[in-house]
Amino acid sequence: MKKLLTLFVTILTALTTSALDFEYGNYKFTTISSTEVECKGFTSSASGNVTTIDVPGQVWNASEQKRYQVKRIASKAFENQTQVTSAYVCYGVESINNYAFRNCKNLGSVWLHSSVSTLGIAVFSGDTNIGMLGYAGEKPFFCTSYSFEGMSRNTQLVVATSRGANACKNKYEISSQFSSIVWNSIAADIETADGCFYNITKGQTLNGDYGEAKLISFRSPSSNTTGTLKPNNSVYEGGTYRTYYYVTAINDSCAVADTKVKILDLSEVTHLTKVGISAFEECTNLTSVKMGGNVLIDQWAFDDCTALTSIDLNGVYKIQSFAFGNTALTSIAIPASMIECDALSFKGASKLANFTVNSGNTLFSAYQGVLYNKDKTRLIDCPPRCSMGGAEVVKLPAMVKVVGANAFDSNTVLKSIEINNGVTEIQKQAFAAMTALLTIIIPESVTIIDTKAFSDCAGLSEIHTLITNPANVTLGDYVFYGVPKNTCKLYVPRGSLQLYKKADQWKDFLNIEQEGGLIGDVNGDGKVNVSDVSALINMIMSITPMNQTLADVNGDGKVNVSDVSALINIILGV
């Protein structure tokens, strides 16, 4: 009895787990797992009659009320279908097995989607009229030296530029199998009616949730008099059997050097998450950009868009380095959605003069055109044309504690800056390449001045440091690189002269003076002579009021006879 029961269970298990055959549209399928099927070819009614092979990426089994992913095309699935003129393999199919399209003698074109990763043996054997085999994948597929055996040698292989001759994973030289190989940047999974090309990056789920696609290129909108590029929010592939995808990204280098696009409108691409590296670089006629979705703008995305004067960043949450270099933007409004950007995000935007920040943003603020964090303890970016209110000597707000990296880099307007007492850190290249800067005041509160903080300030004539002991400041490398140290005067606190003359990097300045005027000019007449000796003695003897700043000639913090000796030595040139 137990043996019979065991046999019954075994048979029942086999029956419930065996392959299930069903039909969907013009095609037959067999299940190969609980979620995947293999395409076995045409149904009996379609065989010999249907001229286009359009293998869907997903199918519906009505008897189970269940959706399946089409994983592969079976061996000999479409063998001898001589009426077929074109074949289109939708996204999701990963392998095409041996002889799948053998002896389809009138097959003229084949399109393989980017999901295809493996080709079997002699897949297109006997197909003597194939003129084009296209492959949209971003990763090379695997094939054997026999995958294209028996196929017409007049076939042109079309692959995307980034794949080139590496379209096959193995090292078999595919060029000998084709009449020519075309590296085409618009070899794509989907082409829409408006001339945009998309690659699928994530398939539609089996419960019907949209997949994801990215815009990889487009036909320049030459017929569009406004030059507007406005991608779809969603796209689909397939003819009779459709699968749908949200557009979530603009591909790297999507439109490099395109001169036809004038307006880029992404406002309706609500699922957009990324504008890729150099996506619209050197689009020299692009004047206006409107973002959408929840977007990261990657490096150089709009670099060298020299006509770009307007951008709506609504929905953008992050901007990478040099995204807007060499554009014509003069003002940027930081939206409520922004959570990450810094001075490098807008580096190279030489005409930029003003930042504003949406009141709903919880991380950033703006004052006098300068971008700060919310509580203004960190100065993030003072753009190249910003005058910070136009004062003769610009004073940083009292609450600032950190001057961020590249914060004033390449500003061409400001001439004199007083850093507020309270700033503790001046980060890398914070004041670099300020072509108009003449004077700067560094407060005693500063403890860190990082690499190249004042580099290439070629016009700098005066640096006033209120730091008593330079040893208390940590300096990065080349802090004053490019500053004219032979002409720029370094003014230091009284009593600190000798410390600065011995301190690394500070000592490179040839003109180091103590604050308060000419050393030894005790009476303040602009000269150093014997009358200053009399004035100093009178101060020491309390005949005249003491002026500590003028009387402390040797800078030791005290006024006594040693200062008289020091003064006499100055007069004698000793």
Image (tube, helix red, strand yellow):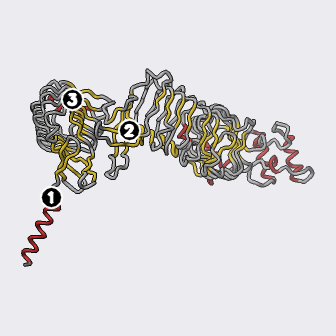
Look at the numbered disc 1 and give the secondary structure of its residue.
loop
Q: Is residue 84 above or below residue 41?
A: above
Quadrant (top left/top right/bottom left/bottom right) for the C terminus: top right
Measured Cα–Cα span from mark 1 to mark 3: 36 Å
**Label 2 sits on residue:** 235
Disc 1 residue type (three-letter): Ser
Q: Position of residue 340 (x, y in %)?
A: 53, 47
Image quarter of residue 192: top left
Q: Can residue 404 be seen in this view?
A: yes
* The one of 270 and 499 positioned closer to us in this rendering: 270
> Which amino acid type corresponds to the residue marked 2 in the rendered image?
Val
Q: Would you say the residues marked 2 and 1 are in contact, meaning their CB atoms lie under 8 Å apart?
A: no
Q: Mark 3 points at which residue?
A: 109
Question: Is residue 473 rendered to the left or right of residue 186?
Answer: right
Give SS at disc 3. strand
Q: Distance between the residues labelled 2 and 1?
A: 36 Å
Q: Residues within 10 Å of mark 1 (few under 14, many from 20)?
A: few
Q: Which of marks 1 and 3 is nearer the N terminus?
A: 1
Q: Is residue 541 left or right of residue 339?
A: right
* Three-letter code, disc 3: Ser
**Residue placed furthest toward the right:** 543
Few, some or many residues within 10 Å of mark 3 (<14, 14–19, 20+): some
Quadrant of the drawing holding the N terminus? bottom left
Instruction: Give whichever of 367, 23 is nearer the camera.
Output: 23
Q: What's the residue at 72%, 37% (across, down)? A: 389
Where does label 1 land, which residue? 18
Question: Which one is nearer the viewer's eye here, 142 or 57?
Answer: 57
**Residue 124 x, y percent position in the rendering:** 13, 34
